[in-house]
Amino acid sequence: MSEKKDKIIGTAAVKKKDSSTAKVKRLYVAPGFQGQGIGTKLLEKTLKFCKENGDEKIVKKYARYFVEGYDPYGVDPKIMVPQREAWLNKYKDELRFEGFLKLGDLLVKSGKYEEAFTAFFFVKSFADHFSPKTLDGFGKWLKSDIKNWAHCDSLCGDILPQFILKNIVALDAFSGWRKSESKWQRRAVPVTMIKLLKTKMPIKSLLDFIEPLMLDEEKVVHQGLGWFLREAWKLYPKTVEAFLLKWKDKCARLIVQYATEKMSAKEKLRFRRSK
């Protein structure tokens, strides 16, 4: 980010090529400040930040948890987290929600691991400003920009449930996501609903809502469904067991494996696929 008189006037997204080289993918300078050399200064500051804070050891440490979409600088969270807090505290009055949301669009678009999490940190602090239009924007992040489970699940855990909990939209606002071309948007449906399990929403309504996803072909969606069902089973065992018995011979086995993970060996026998 580039600053002038304590205000952010530019952003850049950087893609790391190797341990010593990075490439700027997207560069933005506020219209009123274009042509003043801010872009060059921002380029230098961005590259310097990446080189000084990226750590290949951290990249390798966490790479084993990802099959796809993991593109980090390798910045230590001990450095990154307090820096995010400092940025938010310093610029929240000047940038406000609209500014952080636009900045978030650029950060998430970059595909960089730390940049997307920085965007999530900023926007979740403004949940009182969310609107149905904001949900559409986050939906676009999932559909076009998010490429790994960690980004998807962070958005679903910290941000998306707020739209339901704060009565900004009804659950039906997520119905179109169940047929999305994006597997991350489809995964987001059950993962977002985990936070709704302890509300007054009837468990049957929640189970009915995920049914259109039970024959999905993507592994990441299976995992999301199984995770939701496992958490739901802890609270509503009989209802969830009846649902699993209905689907055990038709849905992907991974869904059942995740859903029954906390059951005893004897309990799991009921959910084996019929021969």
Image (cartoon, rainbow, N blue to C red):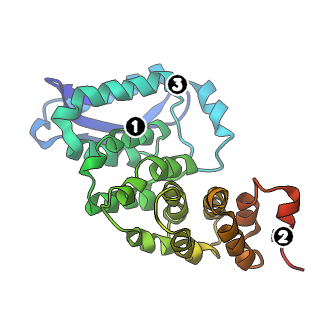
Question: SS class of the residue under badge 2?
Answer: helix
Residue hosting label 1: 118
First in sequence: mark 1 vs mark 2: 1
Assess whether mark 2 and mark 3 are in contact (beta carbons under 8 angstroms): no
Residue at 47 percent across and 41 percent down: it is: 112
Residue hosting label 2: 270
Q: CA separation, marks 1 and 2?
A: 44 Å
First in sequence: mark 3 vs mark 1: 3
What kind of residue is marked 1?
Thr
Number of numbered discs overlaid on the protein picture:
3
106 with respect to 114 (left or right):
left
Q: Position of residue 23 (x, y in %)?
A: 42, 37
Rendered view: 25 above or below 201: above
Q: Position of residue 172 (x, y in %)?
A: 40, 73
Quadrant in the rendering for residue 100? top left
Question: SS class of the residue under badge 1?
Answer: helix
Q: Position of residue 161 (x, y in %)?
A: 42, 55
Residue 58 seen: yes
Residue hosting label 3: 76
Residue reaching furthest to the top: 52
Question: SS class of the residue under badge 3?
Answer: loop
Using a 10 Å C-alpha cutoff, classify the residue at mark 3 as few (fewer than 14 neighbours), some (14 to 19) or many (20 or more): some
Quadrant in the rendering for residue 117? top left
What kind of residue is marked 2?
Arg
